[in-house]
Image (cartoon, rainbow, N blue to C red):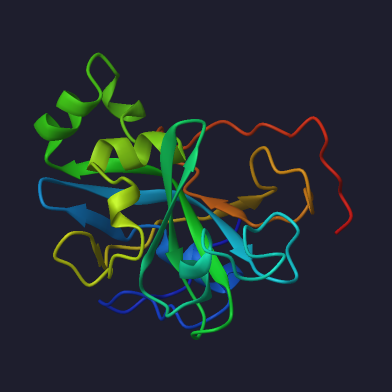
Amino acid sequence: MSPPRPRPDAVPDLRRPAVEVAPDLLGCILRTPDAAVRIVEVEAYEGATDPASHAFRGPTRRNAVMFGPAGVLYVYQLHGHSCCNVICRDAGVAGGVLLRAGEVVDGLDAVRSRRPGVPDARLARGPGNLCRALGIGPAHNGTDLAGPLVRLEPGPPPDAVAAGPRVNVAGAAARPWRFWVPASPAVSAYKRHAAARDLP
């Protein structure tokens, strides 16, 4: 566990490798027109050097957004749920940060209507639940994070940041590219993939 990096009152520079951007996103706010969450758990995914990345084998129609420019949202479907990544690096070089969990800081009633019967701490716990809580879906793929549909805003950095292996990843499973706020009850549980391989 390490203290967070100092962050000015601005969104972190996204034109860097995902593994550098990821911890700096903790504490930032992701806002849609009727709700917002404070980001408390993320995972970094690089491109050609990361077997777990959607961009590992190069650009396709599905992953084209991952190749830039930085500052847009990459939305994909997994088991019928939407998941979203903040895209990093310069255009042409793939990199993204999966948003795994958040704490609702605005629009609680709207989020509860999308996740009825779920305890508040779990409303945006897990990447699919985070998207559902904010109303993010396939139509948001490629959306500019400067708004108005989805906006990434600065927020106070957490007091501490923890790091460890990514959740349910088979390739490069031991890389400590998951970052989270250890004090947050919204952080999801770690699960190791049955076919996890520790070497790249």
- Which quadrant holds the C terminus? bottom right
Residue 187 in the image, given as x and y percentages of width and height? 46, 37
Residue 27 in the image, given as x and y percentages of width and height? 35, 57
| Residue at x 50% of width, y 61% of height | 97
Closer to the camera in the image, 3 or 191: 191
Closer to the camera in the image, 123 or 55: 55
Residue 78 in the image, given as x and y percentages of width and height? 51, 38
Whether residue 4 appears in this view of the structure is: no
Whether residue 96 sits left or right of residue 112 in the image: it is right
- Which quadrant holds the N terminus? bottom right
Identify the residue at the far front of this view.
61
Identify the residue at the far top of this view.
117
Q: Is residue 114 above or below residue 161?
A: above
Q: Is residue 151 above or below residue 168?
A: below
Whether residue 30 sits left or right of residue 148 in the image: it is right
| Residue at x 27% of width, y 63% of height | 155
Report the number of discs.
Answer: 0
| Residue at x 65% of width, y 57% of height | 177
Closer to the camera in the image, 35 or 103: 35
Residue 22 in the image, given as x and y percentages of width and height? 51, 64
Whether residue 33 sits left or right of residue 139 in the image: it is left
Q: Is residue 194 above or below residue 14?
A: above
| Residue at x 41% of width, y 32% of height | 185
Whether residue 166 appears in this view of the structure is: yes
Residue 170 position by quadrant = top right
Closer to the camera in the image, 69 or 12: 69
